Image (cartoon, helix red, strand yellow):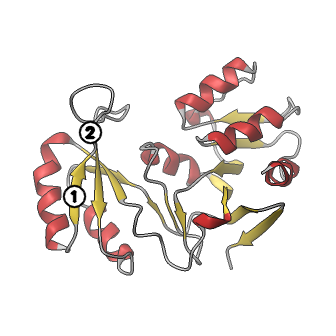
Amino acid sequence: MEKLIEEARALIKPNMNVSFGGGRTVGRLIKSITDKSIKVSSPSEMTRDLCRELNIPVVPLDQVDKFDLAFDGCDSLDADLNVLKSNGGIHTFEKLYANLAKRYIILAPEARSTKELNNDIPLCLEVMELAIPQVKSEVEKLGGKMEVRQSSEMAGIVRTVNGNALVDCHFEDWKKIDEIDATLGRMTGVIGTSYFKNLVTDALLSSGDDVIHLQRK
């Protein structure tokens, strides 16, 4: 993993605008940075807290026109560099940042890269609570099952910073994920989905002591 951090850090040049997502790997990358000329932003509250601990100023998204680089993790990556970013539950914010990135770079273990997306990873939707029954009905029509994410620390559903629910959609495989994501994503009450299509430009994958660098064709 150290070599992965080194290769990622080498991409960061002075005075760049850089977005850092969530997760431990991104956190390690931030801790390795000594260049104080870069402007840092993040969709992750935990990452912003880490930056404050390290005395790294964080620039709000509304003050950024474009990111030179954006680093993030993923739960599953396919051969076309499409990803599922479901477990963290902040995909709506992450996609806003990714949309502004000239290069959106995934940092992950090689095991998360497969020909097709891993069907053990659900498609996660951020959904207004009143819309949950309608979304559930549509998921079942499409041949899937839906679970409302529950909090392990307190009774009730997991809520996003926006106050919405997170629902996990499970399907037998992800061969039709483009169709599924498009259908669910345009439903009234669905705020965002965890499927990132045609956004990732690069993936740095840790493979033992080596790093595999994949780039979008």
Image location (x, y in percent) of residue 37? 86, 32
Q: Residue furthest front?
A: 208
Q: Which residue is mark 2?
A: 150
Which quarter of the rendering shows the C terminus?
A: bottom right
Image location (x, y in percent) of residue 29? 76, 41
Picture layout, residue 154 above or below residue 195 = above
Q: Is residue 106 visible?
A: no
Image location (x, y in percent) of residue 111? 62, 66
Calculate the distance from the C-alpha at mark 1 to the C-alpha at mark 2: 12 Å
- Which element type, helix, strand or loop, lies under badge 1? strand
Q: Amino acid at mark 1?
A: Met
Which residue sits at x=54%, y=38%? 43
**Contact (Cβ within 8 Å) of mark 1 with mark 2:** no
Q: Amino acid at mark 2?
A: Gln
Image location (x, y in percent) of residue 89? 41, 44
Q: Is residue 79 visible?
A: yes
Q: Is residue 119 left or right of residue 25?
A: left
Q: Which mark is residue 146?
A: 1
Q: Which mark is residue 164?
A: none
Task: Tell me the quarter of the picture where residue 160 sits.
Answer: top left
Badge 1: how crowded within 10 Å, few (<14), some, or many (20+)? Answer: many
